[in-house]
Amino acid sequence: MKYFPLLLLVLLGCRETPRVDYEAQKSASFPTAAIAGPHPLATQTGLEILRRGGNAIDAAVAMQLTMAVVFPRAGNIGGGGFLVYRPAQGEPVTLDYREIAPAAAGRDMYLDSLGDVTDGLSTRGHLAVGVPGTVAGIVAMHERFGSLPWAELVQPAIDFARDGYRLSESEIGRLKRYHADFAEFNESTPFSDSSMVAGTQVQQPDLAATLTRIQAEGHAGFYEGETADLIVAEMESGGGLITREDLRNYEAKWKAPITKDYRDYRLISMPPSSSGGIALAQMVEMVEPYPLDDYGFQSVRSVQVIAEAMRRAYADRAEYLGDADFYPVPVDSLLSDDYLKARMSDFRWDSAGTSDNIAAGQVAMKENFETTHISIVDSLGNAVSITTTLNGNFGSKVMVDGGGFFLNNEMDDFSAKPGVPNMFGLVGKEANAIQPGKRMLSSMTPTIVEKDGNLFMVLGAPGGSTIITAVLQTFLNVAEYGMTLPEAVDAPRFHHQWLPDEILYEKDALGGGVLDSLQELGYTFREVNSMAVIKAVQVLPDGSLQAAADPRNPDDDVEGY
Ligand code: GLY
């Protein structure tokens, strides 16, 4: 940690850098290549592909398909995601394979006759499903950047689906919580048997057949033919909207990344339809003028500055962010240095801001959330940061009959009605209103960081609205507070999202009287069990790679060589 005066440290309630106390396998250094991901079977698959001579994109393709089999609550072919890719040679790019609203969707589709949002309609069952993007995304990234044959990368997932894999203790716990939901929307699923225990071997023959079609036909193996027929039949049986035409029309989109310089660093992240890149860039710009390293990790001053930057970025998110193909998102204005300087001009040290006063600038979580993130650096220095999601655990809870995969409930990420919070407590307006073919706004923030022009860090997380603030804090923990990557990932976190006007915090965060001091200034707090779950890789000064997976998820894992 950088030097700063002891007196200032005491006055500002500074706390020591937390110590890493989690298992060694969640954090390790590797000389050549490294992966951090959400499930050991997926990370081991990725490692095998790298060892076979595949590049980071090849490993990512095989991992995403494997996660669709062995991590069904979030890994998926029935959802969507984002790629941020920094090739060792050439410019960084992003790929948006977010779900879209079906052609028959409309802005008021979740409102009742009184104009109120019908509870559960956008989160559970067939109407909650957006047109999936994952397979289109995986095929597109492989076509442009992959090196090993497609069929070879799909095969591990087919093997896991056909031969089975053993459920872990934590997976059993999650599955049992959702058995009633599975029964409500499905005749049966491979996960519906209530006698399953840790170690039970689960086989998924329908999913193996779907993956075999994807292996043989690529994009068309999902969006046309038998798989499309099965999806449409499922929709028709449950009152869903997705048609064959919706599936045929789906396209993943290559986009330029959002970039922002912060001291010696450059953050490269996801543009809309994610809010992550813009909000992250806004927050780092807003905190940059303040000497956070002098203030100290989670000191009163640090928390105050960071929380006020979070508040302002999420206010702008609610007003201005949505799918830029449908709404004129003012990206340049939102990221301009002058705008962001002005944004913090009403910040005061002596009292908390309030979200009533902090509207957008002038230019409670109801459900466990799950998403997946993988960070990869290969032997050539290609870096992949991918976040994918079904939205809630097991998405809509609808499994495609005969197809063997869960469908997302991503429609809830639209703003069903201005000002009414979605399942993450996030509000939105016109920018994120439902329109046919539009992508719903996401908080997923796959990010790559350069230092002095060189690859420095790859990171991202699941965690709904808390993803963006977790990526911010993990970066600042390393860049400002001098933590190692495992320390930075492990460190307790806090989160402010404008509305509700409260700071969420993890149990061990804001200790040493910091929370009391901030309450005296007028901040409101709520303790939560855990927030986003970071997976990250950092390039160390000697060129080796440090990988860290978050202790908040027992199944997170790192691999490398
Ligand atoms: N479904 C959560 C997100 O994309 O932010």
Image: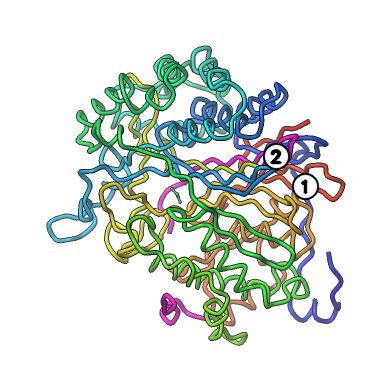
On screen, residue 160 versus residue 237, left or right, reads right
Q: Position of residue 253 (x, y in %)?
A: 44, 44
Residue at the disc numbered 1: 539
Taking the magenta stretch, the answer to whether it contains residue 380 is yes
Q: Position of residue 231 (x, y in %)?
A: 29, 27
On screen, residue 23 versus residue 167, left or right, reads right
Q: Nearer the viewer, residue 371 or 524?
A: 371
Taking the magenta stretch, the answer to whether it contains residue 86 is no
Residue at the disc numbered 2: 377
**Magenta highlight range:** 353-382
Label 2 crowd bin: few (<14), some (14–19), many (20+), radius 10 Å: many
Q: Residue at x 66, y 26 (%)?
A: 54
Please, what secondary structure does the residue beneath circle 1 have?
strand
In which quadrant of the rendered image does the C terminus lie?
top right
Q: Amino acid at mark 1?
A: Val
User: Compared to 199, does 30 lie above or below?
Assistant: below
Q: Amino acid at mark 2?
A: Val
